[in-house]
Image (cartoon, rainbow, N blue to C red):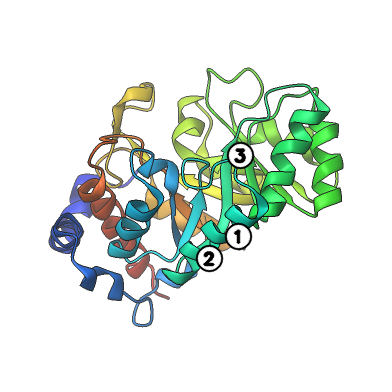
Amino acid sequence: MPNHATTRRGFLTTAAATAATAAAGSSTAGAVTTEEHHWGDIPLAVATYSLRKFSRAAAIGIIKDLGIKYINVKAFHMPYELSIKQLAAARAEFKKAGLEIVSGGNVGLRKDDEDDVRYHLEYCKNAGIGVVVCAPTHKNLPLVEKYAIKYDLKIAIHNHGPEDNFYPAPSDVYKRVKSMDPRMGLCIDVGHTVRTGADILEEIEATKDRTYDFHVKDLADFGDKGSQVDVGEGKMPVAEIFKKLKSTGYKGVVGLEYEINADSPQVGMAKSFSYMRGVLDGQKS
């Protein structure tokens, strides 16, 4: 495994500058582009769960300051109970800010009940969420498939580590969906995956034809759920993960799901994106 402390030092100046810009809330941060960089090979996104303590408008401002275009929108920022008209207005608010909703969730789907599955997937259809990150049970998978087909949605089942009785690792999702409609797939969460003891690179390879979304975070200790740190400060093999995603032909985004410092995550998110951008620039062919 590479020396991540050494690697991080190589990107420290950029990370600090980006973090300072985000912390200041400068509008110039939104001017970051990918034109001169290698970042477009793996488009980076924000899972808005990272900004769960912020209103939609505040979250939009933070994401723009981070120089990020793509988002996985959580119901905090587009509530389930909104009308079709209200959902369209919310989506328009993101679009006006230059942000693109590429996926949504995590949507629980933990009830073995057709009305519940239909309600949540109809919400996704009405909200314009084409890739649904979710956490169904084993029993209701046929219902999820039924409404995924009806509404033409891609389903990205999120693995949640050793505490998850249904899908601890991506391969646990894959074995359930591989014979189902092609819309049925998975969202790999690297932090939860490594806590199962699974090899994250092997998991990416084994599930490549059904991976529709991807969440990244970093851990100081792969055995400790509470050891999450800024990306680049832990043990996660970020460079190898990006290389593997490229080699498998992954077409989605890599979304930062930043679960620490919920009240003030901006600096940590900026550092995490700076690190990932530096890694991607270092992988120029």
Whole-percent x and y of residue 149? 85, 49
Residue contact at pointers 2 and 1, CB within 8 angstroms: yes
Q: Is residue 170 above or below residue 37?
A: above
Residue at 80% over, 55% down? 152
Residue at 18% over, 64% down? 14
Residue at 18% over, 66% down? 26
Q: Tell me the element at label 1.
A: helix
Amino acid type of the residue tagged 2 in the rendering: Ala
Q: Is residue 282 above or below residue 63?
A: below
Q: Residues within 10 Å of mark 1 (few under 14, many from 20)?
A: some
Q: Earlier in the sequence, mark 2 or mark 3?
A: 3
Whole-percent x and y of residue 241? 46, 51
Taking the image as shown, residue 121 lies to the left or right of residue 50, namely right
Whole-percent x and y of residue 30? 30, 70
Residue at 72% over, 24% down? 137
Marking on residue 92: 2
Amino acid type of the residue tagged 1 in the rendering: Ala
Q: Residues within 10 Å of mark 3 (few under 14, many from 20)?
A: few
Q: Which residue is mark 3?
A: 81
In the image shown, does 144 or 174 lie closer to the viewer?
Answer: 144
Q: Tell me the element at label 3.
A: loop
Q: How many marks?
A: 3
Taking the image as shown, residue 19 lies to the left or right of residue 144, namely left
Residue 238, visible in the rendered structure: yes
Amino acid type of the residue tagged 3 in the rendering: Glu
In the image shown, does 122 or 202 lie closer to the viewer?
Answer: 122
Marking on residue 114: none
Residue contact at pointers 2 and 3, CB within 8 angstroms: no
Q: Earlier in the sequence, mark 1 or mark 3?
A: 3
Q: Which residue is mark 1?
A: 88
